[in-house]
Amino acid sequence: MTRNLYLFCSAAEPVFDVAHVIEDAQSRGWDVCLGLTPTAARWVAGSLDGLAALTGRPVRWQYKLPGEADVWPDADALLFAPVTFNSVNSWALGLSGRFTAGVAAEALGRGTPVVAMPCVNAALAAHPQFEQSLSVLRGAGVDVLWGEGGFVPGEVGADTRARFPWQAALDAVDRRGAARP
Ligand SMILES: Cc1cc2nc3c(=O)[nH]c(=O)nc-3n(C[C@H](O)[C@H](O)[C@H](O)COP(=O)(O)O)c2cc1C
């Protein structure tokens, strides 16, 4: 049976590997729907058609208009990775102005299994809101892969793309998705 994975990416450099990640998720049996923040969509603007073809679904970065039909099936799991400092805080604070933060916020209330892997440097991670946001998300049931077993923050300017552990994110999605009744 096919399971639907909402893969949401914000504007951090691991987003440039999203095509490979989609293929990996598909090989694990997931039907992937790709959601991007508007900034991430701008970064990969040249690949949007190819990503839509790869997933077989429209790539989304904004809310539908009133009266428009839903173009995605319901999610069986949601992975928000890479999730930036901005998106972590927006999501945790319930600031749902962006499609990704709004759908991810709603997923918590729907009981959808959710995994998040922040991509945030050590300086931003030291901001007092960050730990609070992670704590809010964990308290709402999100599997937050941060530090050992997830993304380990580096110094400002450190390469994030090579160090971003996408496999750990997909492994967590498989575990959470499989655990769903
Ligand atoms: C080259 C580049 C790399 C960036 N990497 C990160 C990052 O790893 N983590 C992060 O939180 N922000 C990073 N940023 C900043 C975000 O792109 C910026 O805060 C953006 O507004 C995030 O918006 P979003 O969460 O809606 O995608 C980076 C910006 C640039 C230009």
Image: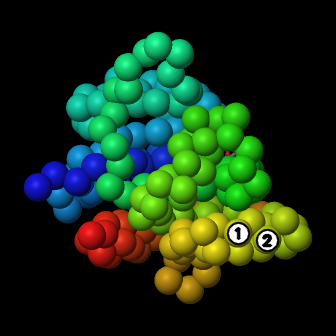
Which residue, given by chain and number where applicable, does mark 1 sit on? 136
Asked which colour scheme the image uses, the reply is: rainbow
Residue at figure coordinates x 46%, y 30% from the top left: 60
- Give the alpha-carbon distance from disc 2 to disc 1, as whole Å: 6 Å
Quadrant of the rendering where the C terminus is positioned: bottom left
On whether ligand 1 comes within 8 Å of the CB at mark 2, the answer is no
For the question of whether residue 159 can be seen, the reply is no
Question: Under tag 1, what secondary structure?
Answer: helix
Name the residue furthest right. 128
Q: Are marks 2 and 1 in contact (CB under 8 Å)?
A: yes
Q: Residues within 10 Å of mark 1 (few under 14, many from 20)?
A: some
Residue at figure coordinates x 17%, y 57% from the top left: 29
Q: Position of residue 88 (x, y in %)?
A: 68, 57
Tell which of 5 and 19 is nearer to you: 5
149 relative to 171, above or below = below
Q: Position of residue 98 (x, y in %)?
A: 65, 35
Residue at figure coordinates x 40%, y 40% from the top left: 34
Q: Position of residue 160 (x, y in %)?
A: 59, 62
Q: Kindly identify the amino acid type of the residue bearing the numbered disc 1.
A: Val
Tell which of 180 and 132 is nearer to you: 180
Which residue, given by chain and number where applicable, does mark 2 sit on? 132
* Residue 41 left/right relative to 89: left
Q: Residues within 10 Å of mark 2 (few under 14, many from 20)?
A: some
Name the residue furthest bottom. 148
* Residue 4 left/right relative to 40: left
24 relative to 172, above or below = above
86 relative to 127, above or below = above
Residue 171 bears which disc, if any?
none
Question: Under tag 2, what secondary structure?
Answer: helix
Query: Picture quarter containing residue 139?
Result: bottom right
